[in-house]
Structure formats: structure tokens, C-alpha cells
Image (cartoon, grey):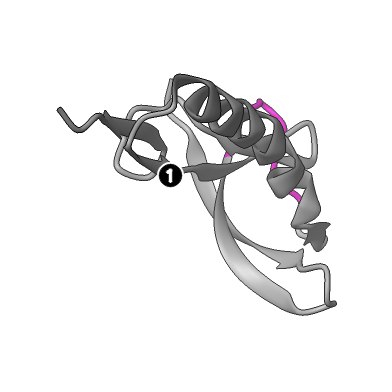
Amino acid sequence: MEFQSKVISVELADGTVVKIEASSISDRKVGLQTRPFSEATSVIKSPVKEIAETVQTIKPDKARVRFGIEIGVDAGKLTAILAKGTSTANLEITLEWDS
């Protein structure tokens, strides 16, 4: 599936409006209205919390999590795309134990 990208305005929690590139992941057109960025960040909280809890349970000596997302628009709302498998949307977890 090929996603179409468009530059849209999003509003941060402090009221600052920034432009981001977002991919349309549905057949609907990406609207021009400013969207709250919290629509995308709220979907990141649960996976990050689960990763943190898992790392705390496993107790490695070192842990590194690299978290890349792509912002998408689905049904008129911002969302985070995590599993696209590109350099913009990925999840890399490195765990190390000292011998």
C-alpha cells in the first residue's frame, strides 16, 4: 500500500502550531484544519509503557530503545505508524547483560 504524504499543521500542548509531514492511511483526503498533536502522541504512551515495564522485569544491565514513528492521518485524526519498516517508522530494542 502506498501512502500519500501531505504537510499539515498540528498544535502542541502549549499552543504552538508546527508543520509536519503526515501520510494518509485511509481513502479519505487529509484535511487542512490544524490537528492537536496529542492525537498522535497519545497512541505512543501505551507501547512505550509496556516496553519500559518489560525491560524493568527482565532487568538487563543496559537497555536502549530507539523509537521512530511516522505520523499518519486516518479518518481525519492523527495517528502514529510504528510498523511500516522504514527508517522513519521503526522500533529497535537492545538489551545487554554483563558477564
Residue 24 picture quarter = top right
| Lateral position of residue 17 relative to residue 72, left or right | right
* Count of all numbered marks drawn on residues in the image: 1
Residue 43 picture quarter = top right
| Lateral position of residue 63 relative to residue 80, left or right | left
Magenta segment, principal secondary structure?
loop
Q: Quadrant of the C terminus?
A: top left
Q: Position of residue 36 (x, y in %)?
A: 82, 58
Q: Nearer the viewer, residue 55 or 33?
A: 55
Q: Nearer the viewer, residue 83 or 61?
A: 61
Q: Nearer the viewer, residue 17 or 42?
A: 42
Q: Position of residue 59 (x, y in %)?
A: 43, 27
The residue located at (30%, 42%) in the rendering is 87
Q: In this view, which residue lies farthest toward the left?
A: 99
- 10 Å neighbourhood of mark 1: few (<14), some, or many (≥20)? some
Residue 25 in view: no
Residue 69 in view: yes
Residue 14 picture quarter = bottom right
Q: Position of residue 95 (x, y in %)?
A: 30, 30
Report the magenta residues as a range: 24-31
Magenta stretch: includes residue 99: no
Say if 62 sits above or below 9 in the image.
above
The residue located at (83%, 68%) in the rendering is 13
Say if 48 sits above or below 71 in the image.
above
Task: Provide the secondary structure element on which disc 1 rests.
Answer: strand
The residue located at (74%, 76%) in the rendering is 17
Q: Position of residue 98 (x, y in %)?
A: 19, 33
The residue located at (45%, 25%) in the rendering is 83
The residue that mark 1 highlights is 68
Q: Quadrant of the N terminus?
A: top left
Q: Amino acid at mark 1?
A: Gly
